[in-house]
Image (cartoon, rainbow, N blue to C red):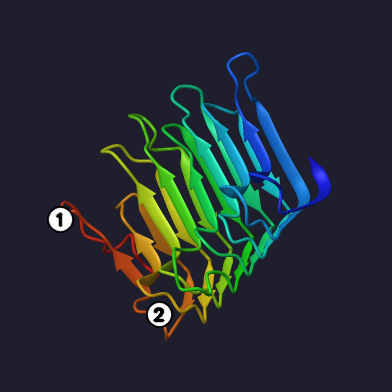
Amino acid sequence: MSARQVSNGSSYAIHLVEFPASPLKSVQIRNVTIADQSRGHAGVLVSTGWAEEVNIDSSLFTRNTVPSLIVALECHEQPSRTRLTNSTFINNDETVVHIDVGECGALEVSRNTFLENNNSGKEGVMMINAEPREGSSKIPLLVEENEFAKNGGEFSAMLTMHGSHAANGSFRQNRLHDNINSVASVVLTSPHYRLESNDFANPLSAHELDVRSDGSWVCLDSCQL
């Protein structure tokens, strides 16, 4: 799907879902504008047990009052890859981007702009979640070269990874400035993300980084802002 503008669709602007008789293999969304979505559950919802690839590129999400983008993959066996690149999210509310790559999904979130979202002060801007299975330590979960600016809400980015197994998580070379977050600019709940070479300048946020450890790990060398 490319070169489309969708404004305030019925339940979703775009809803891509897998049915057993016709599984999704590839999802391509490029140069699409999702604007003014206030009805239903999301601007774009991609919900599937498995897809080989989900690519969202060069798109604009603006003035949505429901979550702008939800990608929910289960991914139990065959690896998959989700990419969100070169897109802009501006003046949206709710959890703006929520991506769950399941047990075996690789992820790239890069060169996106998140600007002036969550001015209501509620929810957060971007939430990344994975639950890696055993043997996933080389699967990349990359969040890099994004800009988060003048966002409100609880956080600008939350990085979570559930379970006892690791993937190769990285949050690097991101620029976060002038955000006003009531919890922290970045919330980290797993030791399996490495933070490095990021630019933080958010004097009005409660914290730059909120590390939520269960006591079994401490964020030292892996948390170089």
Q: Say which residue appears at 30% left-offset and 37% top-offset.
A: 165
Is 169 displayed left or right of 215 in the figure? right
Residue drawn at x 21%, y 59% as measured from the top left: 218
Q: Is tag 1's residue or tag 2's residue first in the polypeptide sequence?
A: 2
Query: Residue 213's x, y, as percent?
Result: 22, 57
Q: Is residue 81 above or below residue 66?
A: above
Q: Residue 107 appears at what percent x and percent y?
A: 53, 44
| Residue 205, label in figure | 2
Left or right? Give the position of 51 relative to 29. Answer: left
- Image quadrant occupied by the C terminus: bottom left
Q: Closer to the camera: disc 1 or disc 2?
A: 2
Q: Is residue 144 left or right of residue 212?
A: right
Residue wearing tag 1? 215
Tell me the element at label 2: loop
The image quadrant where one finds the N terminus is: top right
Q: Amino acid at mark 1?
A: Gly
Q: Amino acid at mark 2?
A: Ser
Against 132, residue 207 (above or below) is below
In the image, 223 versus 61, the foreground residue is 61
